[in-house]
Amino acid sequence: MPTARPPLEPIRTAYKLQFLTQQQLDQLQEATLRILEGTGVRFPSEKALAVLAKAGAHVDRASQVVKFPPALVKKAMASVPRTFAMGGREPVYDFDLKDGGTYFTTDGCGVETIDFDTRQRRPSCKDDVGKMARIADYLPSIAFYWPMVSAQDHGRTAPLHELEAGYANTIKHVQSETIMGEAPARYALEMATVIAGSKEELRKRPSFSLVVCTIAPLVQDKEGIEGAMILAEAGVPVGFLAMPTLGTTAPATMAGALAMGDAEIISAAVLMQLVAPGAPVFHSLMQAWADPSSGAYVSYPLDARCRYAPVEMAHHWGMPALGACYGTDASEAGSWQSGAEVALDPFMAGLVGTEIVTGMGLADTYTLLYPEQLIMDEDIYQRARHYLMSLEVDPETLALESIQAVGPGGNYLAQKHTRTHMRNALKRGITHQPGANGKYRDPRAVAIEKVKWILANHQPEPLEAGKQAELKRILAAADKELV
């Protein structure tokens, strides 16, 4: 039986942070337009090139580089919706990006996991995807689910099996970052239509969405962009994620890397609007750094000031943003590094008004799943959520009658007001769970125990038998075709 369902707990706050000035935003956007017009972006897709050429872009078929007149970019971007709805498998977990909340998801798509039972490191599989979906389904901090690890036991159709495992184990929205190519996108669309009941209902409240990574510098992924075109036509939200690395695949200055990554995203967004004006698209830019001594990928250096600048850049274009949080470079869960690197992430994401945010639950630079890492990251999230809440100041919370009754030098233990409010006054995180001899328990042990409890006790509402059968049929057809 499904356990009791708390409502989602997005970050909501009256406080806002402006990281970039209006002048800086204008300069960055102008730089993006100049890159698109003068340098261009490579689209290794004949289908995309045909659409862009017809719309008036300058297409070099030999190099597959497309240059965009600024007027074309501005006209196409004018049809991008500023907000849109994201549907759950069940309506209870639908949410709309226009409501002002900041909604978080898990991280993905790792390739290894620490086994739930043996605690040994091993390649991930479909069963891991489903188990983590159940945990995400239970946690009110998780608004939607990214398959956290890859279903490596299913080869080329792994992304479709990850989608099915998500649908089977959570009633929340599922967002894929691995469904690439026209044929896989059509299969995913068929699966989502089964869940929705009709194409019209899917367009109204899409139960899944897609993130497509661009290729730095200034290249689109053929399979990604062609799959995105299929989904855009169906009204399924698609986001474009640029991941420039300063010094290797991007300029070594932050402003240059942001402008270049933005050009990749905007060029793809323009294509989606040419394919289907008004298609829901979102913007995501997650920069990293190259270690100059080794070339190693570093996502959390000491100076990562511009981690939230891309959110403001997205809003300046009139697009919702997928922000980047968590995903520590630490190789071990529960270490000082794993907490220190991500400690400010959800707090800052809430302050800059990010609509949706990814990143919870993976270590070793987004590649390794410790199941308890999601619980520890969720604890950091809840701290940020409470930090950003407004303080309740009213006659009840001011407690003037109790203060008068106790007077100087007394205590409040016998007060009715204390009995009413004491249980809720202290919010216990995993760091303050009572243990033996008046000591608090080890937080990591608490997190591991919570993972085990959720897996043993929480079961989301099952898919209807007919829908389960249809998803199995679609997967069987995909497994046969996409070998």
Image (spheres, grey):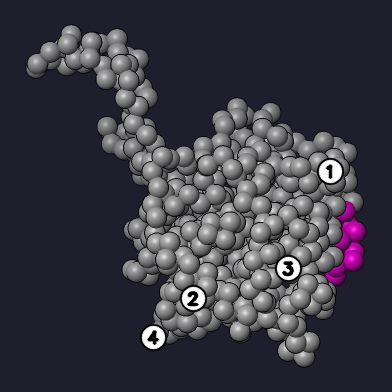
Closer mark to the observer between disc 4 and disc 3 = 3
Question: What label does residue 293 carry, if any?
Answer: 4
Q: Nearer the viewer, residue 214 or 233?
A: 233
Marks 2 and 4 in Cβ contact (< 8 Å):
no
Q: Judging from the image, what secondary structure is the residue with disc 4 in?
A: loop
Residue 287 visible, this angle: no
Seen in the picture, residue 416 relative to 355 is either above or below; the reply is above
170 relative position to 392: left or right: right
* Residue at the extreme front: 71
Q: Quadrant of the C terminus?
A: bottom right
Kind of residue at badge 1:
Glu
Tag 2: amino acid = Ala
| Residue 289 spot, x, y in % from top left | 44, 75
Image: 441 above or below 299: above
Residue that numbered label 1 is attached to: 200
Q: CA distance from mark 1 to mark 4?
A: 54 Å
Disc 1 secondary structure class? helix
What distance separates the C-alpha of mark 2 from that of mark 4? 20 Å
Tell me how far mark 3 sits from mark 2, CA to CA: 22 Å
Query: Sequence-wise, which precedes: disc 2 or disc 4?
Result: 2
The span picked out in magenta is: 474-483
Helix or strand or loop: what does disc 2 sit on? helix
Q: Which residue is mark 3?
A: 271
